[in-house]
Amino acid sequence: PSPEGTYFTATPTPPPPPDAIGTPGFDWEGPAIIYDALKLSNYDGSQKKVISIDVAIWPWHPDYSPEAGRIVTTADTSLWTLDVATGIQRLLSVSGSSNQYIESPVITRDGTKIAYSLVHGFGEEDIQQLWTINADGSENELVIDNTGQYITDPGPFRLIPFAWSLDNTRIYLVTTTDSEASPVGMYVADLSAGKIEKALTPQVTLWEVSFSPDRTMIAYRTFQWVPVEDSMPEIGPPFTLQVTDLTSGATRILQESDTLEYHYPVWSEDGNQIAYTVRSHQTGAEVGLFSIDLATDAIIRWVPGSEGKQLRPWLWLSDDRLAYTEGEVASGWSLLATLYTIRNDGTDKHEIGSATSIVIGVLDN
């Protein structure tokens, strides 16, 4: 750790494109769900494969390009990529010293470029930078120095990349902090202008954000913090499920309640539906897994809930089929979850397997 007040502004040297590791000719045909510790399964669970990796890596908050079938995440002071269809992996060394670390790499939808935050030092006042790099390790470029100067919200925040625009000209960023402060709104970096501005989002905390397929809209949940004497605040009503148009700022409340919480919104690939979980605020019990049609407001319940169950939609496999996890909850903690696929009428349900971490995406191979 650096002494307080010391800044590290060394610039990482753009590395040469690294040699690929792994073996081409990945043995898989057809679409597959990528989940857990890098496993593949087809939609009914009848075909499965574990992806072998050559570095000690566990994808922690990975980002995924569905078009390229490429995963990016951090590996110590490097970026790590995996081309799922071929099994080819790359380590992209980008950090310049032990006093720097990479945060929140995100990849373009077409899989060609990666954005990441490079943090110098370990204190709240240390410098953060926004960098981009090609997925092959070339053209490692500093886009914006000292991103913290653009933050307009009070608090000990730093900016981290969250998603690229579909045309690869803008990077959406959110604030994060090591303290208990709650971030507000979203920011957007214009790569050609080399500056960051506040995005057209409400001045609320955007919880569990999901981007529409064209990256022009976001869905998210909101609630109010309720003060508690001599303790941490608690969440309270009103609870909402909202969508915001990032091009105009227009915001629409899809669901609102004083007794029901809305969690884990996920856009369908056609952009016409959002799946989400409903939970009782009083008991914490799941009411069920639902979807809403954005054109008609029609709501479908896919899976019923119950006490001690935790449901989470992860992926739309088609406009009438979802991948979701169902976990047991004991003493307020979620235990091992099971991954399923199901159609919106409750039929064609298949158990895929345990999902101890996350579901990353779909490989359309």
Image (cartoon, rainbow, N blue to C red):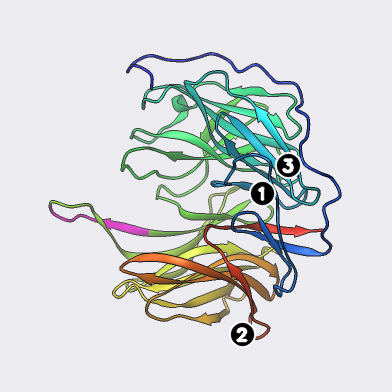
Q: Amino acid at mark 2?
A: Gly
Q: Nearer the viewer, residue 139 or 82?
A: 82
Q: Which residue is mark 2?
A: 346
Q: Which residue is mark 3?
A: 167
Please name the residue shown 38% across and 22% down the image.
1
* Part of the protein shown in magenta: 223-229
Q: Amino acid at mark 1?
A: Tyr
The reply to whether callout 1 and callout 3 are in contact (CB within 8 Å) is no
* Residue 294 visible: no
Tell me how far mark 2 sits from mark 1, CA to CA.
Answer: 28 Å
- Among numbered discs 1 and 3, the one appearing first in the sequence: 1
Observer-side mark, 1 or 3, equals 1
Q: Position of residue 193 (x, y in %)?
A: 64, 26
Residue 40 falls left or right of residue 106: right
User: Magenta stretch: residue 227 in it?
Assistant: yes
Crowding at mark 2 (Cα within 10 Å: few <14, some 14-19, many 20+): few
- Among numbered discs 2 and 3, the one appearing first in the sequence: 3
Q: Position of residue 203 (x, y in %)?
A: 41, 47
Please name the residue shown 58% across and 70% down the image.
324
- Name which quarter of the figure residue 291 lies in: bottom right
Q: Which residue is mark 1?
A: 64
* Residue 30 visible: yes
SS category of the residue bearing label 3? loop
Tell me how far mark 1 sits from mark 3, CA to CA.
Answer: 16 Å
SS category of the residue bearing label 2? loop
Tell me how far mark 2 sits from mark 3, CA to CA.
Answer: 37 Å
Please name the residue shown 57% across and 18% down the image.
96
Observer-side mark, 2 or 3, equals 2
- Among numbered discs 2 and 1, the one appearing first in the sequence: 1
